[in-house]
Image (cartoon, rainbow, N blue to C red):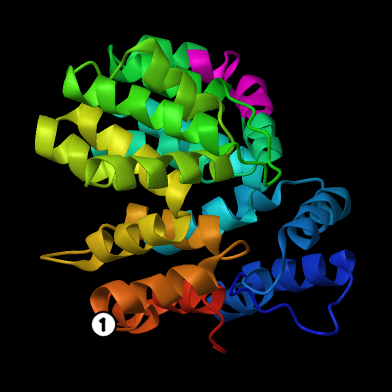
Amino acid sequence: MGTLRVPEVVPSPVEDSETLMKAFKGWGTDEKAIIRLLGQRNASQRKKIREAYQQLYNKSLIDDLNSELSGDFRKAVILWTYDPPERDARLANEALKSRRKNLKELQVIVEIACASSPDHLIAVRQAYCSLFDCSLEEDITKNVSLPVQKILVNMVSSYRYDKEVVDNSIANLEAAKLRESIRTKKLDRDDLVFILSTRNIYQLGACFECYKQNYGYSIDKDIAKSWGRGLLESILKVIIRCIQSPEKHFAEVVKDSVVGFGTDENSLTRAIVMRAEIDMMKVRGEYNIMYKTSLDYAVEDDTSGDYKDFLMTLLGAKI
């Protein structure tokens, strides 16, 4: 369940477009009006607003937001205003074109591939082709080295069956294959890649449970124990976490973004924007269980100004 609060009575897209244009005009931008409006519209409503705005003013709402806003607030509002597949395609491209290809960047690809519905992943891949004149798979191949490249290409190429179907005998058999890959230190072998990239999440949940029962460790802990903390091992642990519990994964992303000196605004924005309409209530609950404190408090305490108000609006606060 998401945290987005949509008003019971929503103005028409034309009315919303007029309100936004009014917020842009004058001596200064009315940021609060933008937050109240866009921060309380779902993806379908935002799409209609973008279309109405283009028809009314013959200009792009995204372009006007880009010129009127600034900083982390601007990036958060624009990411939110994009159609979700386009947003994720742009996030994936930004991660792949980054000079650094470490876990922080590449886990974005895993989130899109493993914490989204199969249909959303297809839509992201289509958007990527339209925006960047090549496939997501091609850009992974060009920008990520083996063996991580092999894992990521298979993850984004997957179309998982999304119904709750489990075969326990297969789960037990494939747990043994995963164990063999870890024991022999061949984390990019075809068996492991095939299992993680093709099985439905319920089947994989059963497989991971068999692994723990049969070998005494959860699979992610066994990878860490046997291999350590290299990039491939870390990517595999993110894949497993996103499949097992995307809520726990995004709780960790939020925590990592606010802990220590300074805030990782890009990661914090991504986590909240990506999950506000999907499962942020569950992310909030997992955060509370894992860290014995409130996710909302952590966000509010570590951000400021319009950026804080916008994120808190997506978290369901009344601004």
Q: Indicate the secondary structure of the residue bearing disc 1.
A: loop
Which residue is painted at 39% across and 71% down in the image?
286
Quarter of the N terminus within the rendering: bottom right
Quarter of the C terminus within the rendering: bottom right
Q: Look at the image and say whether residue 49 sits in the magenta stretch.
A: no
Q: Is residue 14 above or below residue 138?
A: below
Q: Which residues are magenta?
A: 125-137
Task: Identify which residue, 300 or 221, lies in the foreground.
Answer: 221
Quadrant of the rendered image containing residue 80 = bottom right
On the question of residue 90 being in view, the answer is: no
Which residue is painted at 60% across and 14% down in the image?
133
Task: Identify which residue, 206 or 50, lies in the foreground.
Answer: 206
Q: Is residue 299 above or below residue 213?
A: below
**In the shown orientation, is residue 60 left or right of residue 111?**
right
Name the residue beneath numbered marker 1: 292
> Magenta region, mostly helix, strand or loop?
helix
**In the shown orientation, is residue 291 left or right of residue 160?**
left
On the question of residue 132 being in view, the answer is: yes
Which residue is painted at 46% across and 54% down in the image?
246
Instruction: Check disc 1 and give the amino acid type.
Output: Lys
Q: Look at the image and say whether residue 136 sits in the magenta stretch.
A: yes
**In the shown orientation, is residue 203 left or right of residue 189?**
right
**In the shown orientation, is residue 25 left or right of residue 319?**
right
Quadrant of the rendered image containing residue 94 = top left
Residue 18 coordinates in the image, percent (x, y) = 80, 69
Residue 13 coordinates in the image, percent (x, y) = 86, 65
Q: Residues within 10 Å of mark 1 (few under 14, many from 20)?
A: few
Residue 49 coordinates in the image, percent (x, y) = 79, 59
Q: Is residue 281 above or below residue 57?
A: below
Which residue is painted at 25% across and 75% down in the image?
291
